[in-house]
């Protein structure tokens, strides 16, 4: 995508919400700031990153036409002469822009800002099957659609995304599949009475209503006890690991704006033992939490909600050394997890649910134990068991890879490696674990946390930053990138297979 096109798209986005920023202000910022110029220049990098054309032949089937699947289809289509590509996708709004759900939750965008129609993003010449895969048969190179139609393939890409397992928490219901908009069971509890979640579209819209209700309650609140706003972060990998905190920061911003922040105690309950897996970002976030008077309790996993009494139950866990006996009755020590229940009253609670692969994937031969992710070589993204099966996006079993930013790196690796294998060569392109978390810290600032697997090594620091700026700082320029530039880059750049 060219710099001018990005600028035009940014200004179109700005025009949609003049209450956030006027076009005049946006132009002023963009023209006076050398940083903005640098961001825009970097944002348009990748426009020319089409891979060399190839004359390989074979039938390619892509299961899931969301962000990862449709971008892969577009890039394969751009690259292979006379490509034979089929995308299987049931949701007519599959390419909707999920990162915008955080902004909807805070009343900054509405649903029309993120909903995009699948049929307008199917690359020309690519076949679309409007259905869901109900069985994988990798030994016979086939999938079954809607329980009846067998589709065979030479190469298979699995990009089904992730399921939101609200029903895994006692007292809540439903597992929302990324393949359906059916969320009726979950909506029986979440979306009302102070219980909210931005992870699904209707939930995001209802979260803003919930924040407004909290504000009204706070305005009328008397007495020394504060209202309790609780934010959870589940056990296990989740898509956009920053979202549980982003909605907390934005709720804070709305409470401050309404003049009622002092009436509400805001507490974060993450399952993990830190704010972020990378030390520099962890330290920056702790400082941001302290500045905003946020409270937090590590190692708390939400396991039950009693909606009648507005009580959340967390498993507070820790690891302890325990003595065991081996087969010769010799004692040995092993670390085991122990936990105790902790009950917490809430007036408002934002739930980030436990997540898993859809059962059709997890319980098949391409899936795995536990959450069921597709087992792949984490660098080449090729299935561990089937050389003609590939996976990327949220459903792929790679560490830290569950963001649109990861998918943006992964789809190029899958395309290059699949074409190598179709040419009789080894897959050599490698994903390095890159992911990005534009952590919204207020209305107007973002900390752009970019990292990869190497960032975890002691002393690596913030090694994956794309821009020549300290990424641990909160900046308006990242807000500009997050709120105005990333959507056009995704919808026009990534979904066309180029950016
Ligand atoms: C609240 C929120 C905030 C986020 N913020 C950010 C952010 O700031 N930055 C960022 O980079 N990412 C963010 N993300 C994450 C990002 O949106 C996802 O990582 C990305 O959409 C993953 O793409 P995907 O193609 O793997 O999955 P999806 O885009 O979910 O697509 C999966 C598709 O597979 C289809 N499917 C499922 N099962 C089947 C089946 N059996 N047969 C056929 N099709 C099937 C579904 O219908 C769906 O269309 C956020 C997500 C949320 C929810």
Image (tube, rainbow, N blue to C red):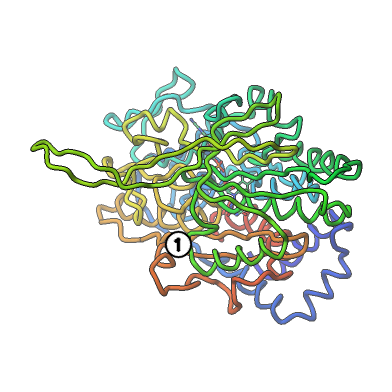
Q: Is residue 191 above or below residue 146?
A: below
Expressed as whole percent of the image width and height from the top left, the position of residue 74 reads 52, 50
Left or right: residue 346 compared with residue 148: right
Q: Which one is nearer the viewer's eye here, 265 or 393? A: 265
Q: Quarter holding the C terminus?
A: bottom right
Q: Which one is nearer the viewer's eye here, 231 or 390? A: 231
Q: Secondary structure at mark 1?
A: loop
Q: Is residue 480 above or below residue 303?
A: below
Q: Is mark 1 within 8 Å of ligand 1?
A: no
Expressed as whole percent of the image width and height from the top left, the position of residue 359 reads 44, 28
Q: Quarter holding the N terminus?
A: bottom right
Q: Residue furthest right?
A: 220
The quarter of the displayed image where residue 5 is located: bottom right
Residue 466 appears in the rendering: yes
Q: Quadrant of ligand 1?
A: top right
How would you rate the neighbour count of disc 1 (Cα within 10 Å): few for under 14, some for 14-19, many for 20 or more?
Answer: some
Left or right: residue 104 compared with residue 86: right
In percent of the image, x 62 and y 68: which residue is there? 43
Tell me the residue that label 1 is attached to: 51
Residue 119 appears in the rendering: no
Left or right: residue 68 compared with residue 218: left
Q: Is residue 239 above or below residue 438?
A: above
């Amino acid at each position: 995508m060219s710099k001018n096109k990005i600028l035009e798209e940014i200004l179109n986005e700005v025009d949609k919400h003049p209450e956030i920023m006027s076009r005049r202000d946006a132009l002023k910022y963009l023209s006076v700031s050398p940083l903005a110029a640098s961001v825009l220049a970097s944002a348009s990098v990748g426009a020319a990153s089409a891979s060399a054309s190839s004359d390989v032949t074979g039938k390619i089937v892509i299961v899931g036409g969301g962000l990862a699947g449709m971008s892969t289809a577009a890039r394969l289509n751009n690259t292979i002469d006379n490509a034979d590509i089929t995308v299987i996708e049931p949701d007519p709004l599959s390419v909707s822009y999920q990162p915008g759900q955080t902004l909807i939750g805070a009343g900054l965008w509405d649903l029309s800002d993120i909903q995009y129609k699948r049929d307008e993003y199917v690359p020309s010449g690519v076949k679309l099957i409007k259905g869901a895969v109900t069985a994988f048969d990798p030994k016979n190179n086939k999938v079954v659609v809607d329980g009846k139609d067998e589709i065979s393939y030479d190469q298979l890409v699995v990009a089904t995304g992730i399921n939101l397992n609200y029903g895994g928490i006692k007292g809540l219901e439903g597992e929302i599949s990324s393949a359906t908009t059916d969320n009726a069971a979950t909506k029986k509890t979440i979306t009302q009475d102070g219980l909210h979640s931005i992870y699904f579209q209707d939930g995001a819209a209802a979260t803003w209503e919930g924040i407004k209700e909290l504000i009204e309650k706070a305005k009328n609140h008397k007495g020394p006890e504060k209202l309790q706003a609780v934010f959870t972060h589940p056990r296990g990998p989740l898509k956009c690991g920053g979202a549980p905190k982003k909605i907390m920061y934005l709720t804070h911003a709305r409470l401050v704006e309404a003049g009622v922040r002092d009436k509400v105690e805001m507490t974060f309950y993450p399952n993990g033992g830190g704010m972020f897996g990378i030390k520099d970002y962890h330290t920056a976030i702790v400082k941001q939490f302290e500045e905003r008077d946020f409270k937090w309790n590590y190692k708390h996993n939400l396991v039950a909600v009693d909606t009648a009494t507005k009580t959340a139950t967390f498993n507070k866990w820790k690891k302890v050394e325990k003595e065991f006996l081996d087969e010769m009755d010799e004692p040995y020590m092993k670390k085991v997890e122990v936990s105790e229940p902790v009950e917490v009253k809430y007036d408002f609670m934002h739930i980030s649910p436990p997540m898993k692969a859809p059962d059709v994937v997890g319980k098949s031969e391409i899936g795995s134990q536990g959450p069921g992710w597709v087992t792949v070589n984490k660098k080449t993204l090729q299935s561990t068991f089937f050389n003609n099966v590939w996976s990327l996006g949220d459903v792929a079993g790679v560490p830290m890879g569950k963001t649109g930013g990861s998918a943006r790196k992964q789809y190029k690796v899958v395309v290059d490696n699949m074409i190598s294998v179709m040419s009789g060569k080894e897959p050599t392109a490698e994903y390095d674990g890159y992911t990005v978390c534009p952590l919204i810290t207020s209305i107007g600032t973002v900390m752009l946390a970019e990292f990869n697997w190497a960032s975890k090594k002691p002393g690596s620091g913030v090694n994956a930053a794309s821009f020549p700026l300290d990424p641990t700082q909160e900046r308006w320029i990242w807000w500009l990138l997050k709120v105005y530039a990333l959507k056009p880059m995704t919808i026009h750049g990534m979904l066309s297979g180029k950016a």
